[in-house]
């Protein structure tokens, strides 16, 4: 799994940092999200999916790479 943030859409709500703090951080100076683990462990999928679901700006996505499933 790969986590993607569209920084043009990010509005700085920081919902993602609450849902998946091991994957997302917030850059106060830039007022936007930082993906600190672009390829988190599969065990974090529920938290990452919650962050994607609850992002008010719909700036987050999970991309499943079929090459990683080997």
Image (cartoon, rainbow, N blue to C red):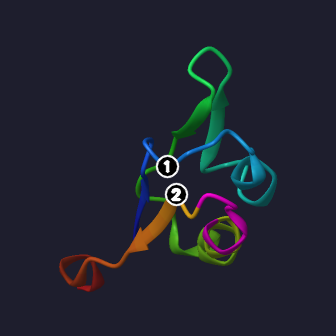
Is residue 54 toward the left or the right of residue 62 in the image? right
| Count of numbered circles in the view | 2
**Residue bounds of the magenta highlight:** 52-57
Marker disc for residue 59: 2
**Residue 52: x, y in percent?**
61, 68
- Between 55 and 16, the residue placed more toward the observer is 55
Is residue 34 toward the left or the right of residue 39 in the image? right
Q: Which residue lies furthest to the top in this view?
A: 29
Q: Residue furthest left?
A: 67
State the image quarter where residue 68 is shown.
bottom left
- Between 68 and 3, the residue placed more toward the observer is 3
Say whether residue 56 is magenta: yes
On screen, residue 27 above or below 20: above
Instruction: Identify the residue shown where x is 70% and y is 54%.
Output: 16
> Which SS class for mark 2?
loop
- Mark 2 vs mark 1, CA separation in Å: 5 Å
Quarter of the image with the N terminus in it: bottom left
**Residue 5: x, y in percent?**
45, 52
Say whether residue 1 is magenta: no
On screen, residue 61 above or below 13: below
**Residue 17: x, y in percent?**
73, 47
Q: Name the residue under label 1.
A: 9
State the image quarter where residue 63 is shown.
bottom left
Instruction: Identify the residue shown where x is 63% and y is 42%.
Output: 11
Give neighbour class at mark 1: few <14, some 14-19, many 20+ (Cα, 10 Å): few
Q: Mark 2 or 1 closer to N-term?
A: 1
**Residue 49: x, y in percent?**
62, 75
Quarter of the image with the C terminus in it: bottom left
């Amino acid at each position: 799994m790969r986590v993607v943030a569209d920084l043009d859409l990010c509005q700085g709500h920081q919902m993602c940092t609450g849902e998946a703090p091991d994957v997302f951080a917030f850059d106060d100076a830039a007022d936007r999200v930082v993906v600190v683990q672009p390829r988190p462990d599969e065990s974090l999928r529920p938290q990452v999916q919650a962050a994607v679901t609850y992002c008010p700006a719909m700036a987050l996505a999970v991309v499943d790479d079929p090459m990683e499933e080997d």
